[in-house]
Image (tube, rainbow, N blue to C red):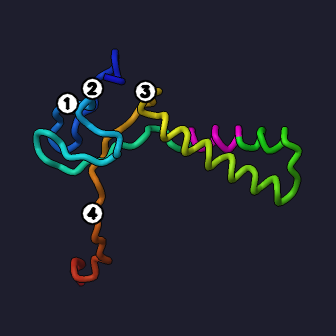
Amino acid sequence: MWYSGRTPIKCPACDVALDLAAIAETGSFDCQSCGTALLLKMKGEWIYLLVSLTLASAVAYVHGLESIVFAGGVLLCGLVAQLALHALSWQLGLPKKVVPVPPVIQTLGVGSRKL
């Protein structure tokens, strides 16, 4: 397992340890014990975004890009860095968290309030 030496990841609904070896890299799966739909997300995703944008800025600066081309280069390099990070996150063993899948249908809750 990728979390060797760490505490195992548990289902937030039933608090049972999940077997991550049986989970594909798709991101969403069902709990083996309770059947709750779960989503595998990276912990501290904003830190990875900040690091990739910083590296993208450095790459754009080294290439001598200026003005709007610099901004476009940062966005393009940042996008490539984020895609590479997400593709390699399973192999690199980056920390992940499991959250329940949000409902597909969202309502405004108009009828649920008491006046």
Q: Nearer the viewer, residue 8 or 23?
A: 23
Circle 3 or circle 1, nearest the eye: 3
Circle 3/circle 1 CB separation < 8 Å: no
In the picture, the disc for residue 104 is: none
Mark 2 is surrounded, within 10 Å at the Cα level, by few (under 14), some (14 to 19) or many (20 or more) other residues, namely some
Q: Please name the residue shown 70% across and 38% down the image.
A: 55
Q: Which residue carries the number 2 mark?
A: 8
Question: Magenta part of the protein: which range?
Answer: 47-55
Q: Assign the C terminus to one quadrant of the image.
A: bottom left
Q: Earlier in the sequence, mark 2 or mark 4?
A: 2
Circle 1/circle 2 CB separation < 8 Å: yes
Q: Which residue carries the number 4 mark?
A: 103
Cα–Cα span, label 2 and label 4: 26 Å
Q: Earlier in the sequence, mark 4 or mark 1?
A: 1
Expressed as whole percent of the image width and height from the top left, the position of residue 63 reads 84, 42
Expressed as whole percent of the image width and height from the top left, the position of residue 51 reads 64, 38
Circle 3 or circle 4, nearest the eye: 3
In this view, which residue lies farthest toward the top? 5
Q: Quadrant of residue 31?
A: top left
Cα–Cα span, label 4 and label 1: 23 Å
The three-letter code of the residue at mark 1 reads Ala
Q: Which residue carries the number 3 mark?
A: 93
In the picture, the disc for residue 17 is: 1
